[in-house]
Structure formats: C-alpha cells, structure tokens
Amino acid sequence: MEPAHEGLYRVESLGKQHDRAGFCCGVESLDSYLKTQASQDMRRKANAVFALVAEQSPEQIAGYFTLCACGLAPGEVPEEARKHIPRYPQVSATLLGRLAVRMELHGQGLGGVLLAEALRKAYENAAVVGSSMVVVDAIDDRAARFYRAHGFIRLPESLRLILPMRMIGGVVAG
C-alpha cells in the first residue's frame, strides 16, 4: 500500500458484504461485470476478484481488480521481455483482467494502489501456479499509458501489455 493510503484502505477478496450495486467507475463494462458476473466467476474459480475498501466503510467498494491464469505464444512477447521468460510452446502468465476505481475517487492514486496489490498477489502466487509474467489488455489508450507508466511493455499494434515476474520481483522484493 502506498504510504499516503496506508491504514486508510485495505484489499480483500470480494464478498457478500460488499455493495456492488453502488459501484460506478464510469466504464459500463467494468461496472456491469462487478454487479452481475464477479460473484459467479469467483464461485466457478474463473477469476479471483479483489475489492479495495476504506477502513471506515468496508462495505463500500473503492475499486477492484481481477486475476486469473492465462497463456501466450512466445511470439506474442516483445523482444525486450523474452530474456525474462522460459522457452516453452506456451508461456504461462497471470491476467490482470479488470482494474477499476470508483468515479468519485479518480485522481487520488488508488489505481496505482490497486495495481501494486495486483502485482504483489500475482508475484506471491507465481511459483504456485507457474506464471512468468502479468498480462493486461488495456481498455483504451489512456489505460495503456497508465500501465506503461508502471513499467509494462506494450505489444506491437495492440492494447495488450506485459510485465515479466522478474521485473515485478525487483519492485516487490526491493
């Protein structure tokens, strides 16, 4: 957790106590997912969904992110990142599928808090599930710039970005 937010917020698995209906980030597909699909995905083990909540109002979702396993063909990985991954027909990865912050909290650095927590969780579990990188499919160019600013490498001619676990380890461990 970033120092400015430490003690104010915590990240926890999405649960029945969280108010999904009141969440609005300004992107209909992200709002709709949380309200209609997230619980089902968790029950089916299709996605892990994590909520960022304020200590003083833990039922209100300030933001959320999802993680799940995925695979990439090695050719999809940019040259600058290939030295960080194993040479297999399929490269195992963790997909950061969704990341959203409540609209009235935009601009307060909570997107960075969520991303840091998602990367920490992905890194801590990489040895258990065999993941060599985090992959994100940015929703638009603005989101892609956000991920690039946090060290992700953009795949050519796409909104897909990756961050090798070795690079995450340097930040998480350091």
Image (cartoon, rainbow, N blue to C red):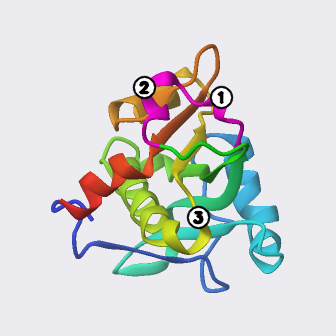
Say what secondary structure mark 3 lies in: loop
Q: Which of marks 2 and 3 is nearer the N terminus?
A: 2
Q: Which mark is residue 80?
A: 2
| Mark 3 burial class by Cα count in 10 Å: few <14, some 14-19, many 20+ | few
Identify which residue, 143 or 133, lies in the foreground: 133
Residue that carries the numbered disc 1 in the rendered image:
76
User: In this view, which residue lies farthest toward the bottom?
Assistant: 17
Say what secondary structure mark 1 lies in: helix
Q: Residue 111 carries which label?
A: none
From the viewer's perspective, is residue 156 above or below residue 137?
A: above
- Left or right of 158 in this view: 45: right
From the viewer's perspective, is residue 163 above or below residue 121?
A: above
Q: Are marks 2 and 3 in contact (CB under 8 Å)?
A: no
The image shows residue 22 at horizontal and vertical percentages of 62, 64
Residue that carries the numbered disc 3 in the rendered image:
130
Taking the spot 60% from the left edge, 26% from the top edge, the residue there is: 140
User: Spatial distance from mark 1 to mark 3, Cα to Cα?
Assistant: 18 Å
Identify which residue, 90 or 9, lies in the foreground: 90
Residue interval drawn in magenta: 72-84
The amino acid type of the residue labelled 3 equals Gly
The image shows residue 21 at horizontal and vertical percentages of 69, 66
User: In this view, which residue lies farthest toward the front?
Assistant: 87
User: Spatial distance from mark 1 to mark 2, Cα to Cα?
Assistant: 12 Å
Q: Quadrant of residue 151?
A: top left
The amino acid type of the residue labelled 2 equals Glu
The image shows residue 73 at horizontal and vertical percentages of 71, 36
The amino acid type of the residue labelled 1 equals Glu
User: In this view, which residue lies farthest toward the top?
Assistant: 157
Taking the spot 36% from the left edge, 56% from the top edge, the residue there is: 116
